[in-house]
Amino acid sequence: MDLGTLYLSEVRERLRGTKQLGDRALAQLPEEHWHTVLAPEGNSVAVIVQHLAGNLRSRWGGLLGGYREGVEGESPTRDRDAEFEDAQLSPAELIARWDDGWQVFLDALDHLRPDDLTQTLTIRGEAHTVLGAVERAALHASGHVFQLVFLVKTLRGEEFQSLSIPRGASAVFNAQMLRRA
């Protein structure tokens, strides 16, 4: 397998896992906490979801059918500033936006070919390789997902269900993994 094919396979898998992590965190958040802000100038879960969904739709919507030369990785209709204003959407509306943004991004990734990775994609007029744009998006999305996990864990307190290996359970987990190998 060539490096480009391997990279695309790995990044698709990792980003699907990143979305799942966010899904599992959001599933634990009661309706009354979606719009809670922990500090002045902080973002609520709702605002982070609005922003990330808007970013993913804007940046990757032009590549849904695959890479095309000259595609601008920022939709001219995007209102980024509005993404940071709480629109007071319901959890169901926010999840719909979340799922839509991720679907656009993951569909675009599914249509990329290894040869596309070295092509140029501009974002707000700044040139990137497609590989660089994917990495930029992966880091951006991961950062916001980890913010969501932190917020949900903080808001849920002792009721939060671990999304990975629970504290004190590493030895049991490692033994299970070794038995599978």
Image (cartoon, rainbow, N blue to C red):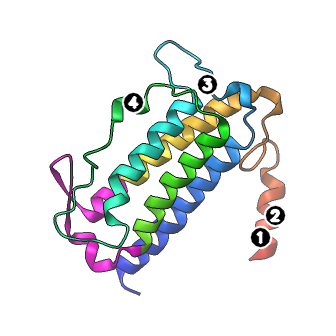
> Which amino acid type is marked by label 1?
Leu
Q: Is residue 134 visible?
A: no
Residues at discs 3 and 1 in contact (Cβ within 8 Å) = no
Q: Quadrant of the N terminus?
A: bottom left
Q: Quadrant of the C terminus?
A: bottom right
How far is mark 2 from mark 3, CA to CA?
40 Å
**Residue with the mark numbered 1:** 178
> Which amino acid type is marked by label 3?
His
Q: Position of residue 93 (x, y in %)?
A: 61, 41
Left or right: residue 61 compared with residue 88: left
Residue lying at 48% horizontally and 52% vertically, measured from the top left: 101
Q: Nearer the viewer, mark 4 or mark 3?
A: 4
116 part of magenta stretch: yes
**Residue with the mark numbered 3:** 35
Precedes in sequence: disc 2 or disc 3: 3
Q: Is residue 108 above or below residue 137?
A: below
**Residue with the mark numbered 2:** 175
Residues in magenta, as a range: 111-136
Q: Position of residue 32 (x, y in %)?
A: 72, 25
> Which amino acid type is marked by label 2?
Ala
Residues at discs 1 and 2 in contact (Cβ within 8 Å) = yes
